[in-house]
Image (tube, grey):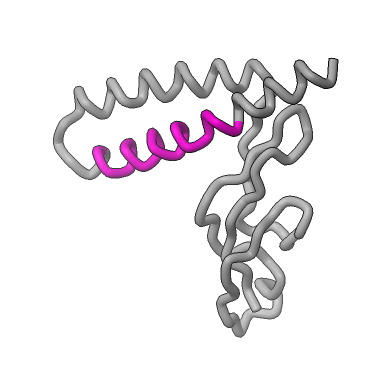
Amino acid sequence: MELLATASSDMMVAMLPVMDDFERAIKAISVSDDKSALDGIHLIYNKLKSILDNKGLEAMNCTGTVFDAELHEAITTMPTADEAKKNTVIEEVEKGYLLKGKVIRHAKVVVGG
């Protein structure tokens, strides 16, 4: 059973850069006038995301949450005068993912300091 879970986790981790590339492509194409290309990219991305979601993959939503070393990797801190933003995730540089509740990739974040 553990072997199956590990194999599934390895496959999911291998697919995460593909998800990142799709998200970057969507962002880049969305500023152009090429609606058909954007629609095609969205179609493929949504199909892949649906498959991974059905296998238990879940993207973390980190922006605005309190920094947690179990979930986040702080790549830098940004000074903030607002006390409420101290030790809080200000920006998500790279998404983190959970597989069936277990962290398979920590989110790379900017933390208020």
Quadrant in which the N terminus is drawn: top right
Q: In which quarter of the image is residue 84?
A: bottom right
User: Residue at point 28% right, 23% down?
Assistant: 39
- Residue 11 in the image, given as x and y percentages of width and height: 60, 24
User: Residue at point 70% right, 36% down?
Assistant: 98
Q: Give the range drawn in magenta.
A: 13-29
Is residue 113 covered in magenta?
no
Quadrant in which the C terminus is drawn: bottom right
Q: Report the residue that reaches farthest toward the front.
A: 3
Name the foreground residue: 9 vs 36.
9
- Residue 56 in the image, given as x and y percentages of width and height: 69, 23
Is residue 22 covered in magenta?
yes
- Residue 2 in the image, given as x and y percentages of width and height: 84, 21
Q: Report the residue that reaches farthest toward the bottom.
A: 81
Q: Is the magenta stretch mostly helix, strand or loop?
A: helix
Q: Quadrant of residue 57?
A: top right
Is residue 14 toward the left or the right of residue 101 in the image? left
- Residue 28 in the image, given as x and y percentages of width and height: 27, 43
Name the foreground residue: 31 vs 101.
101
User: Residue at point 63% right, 73% down?
Assistant: 112
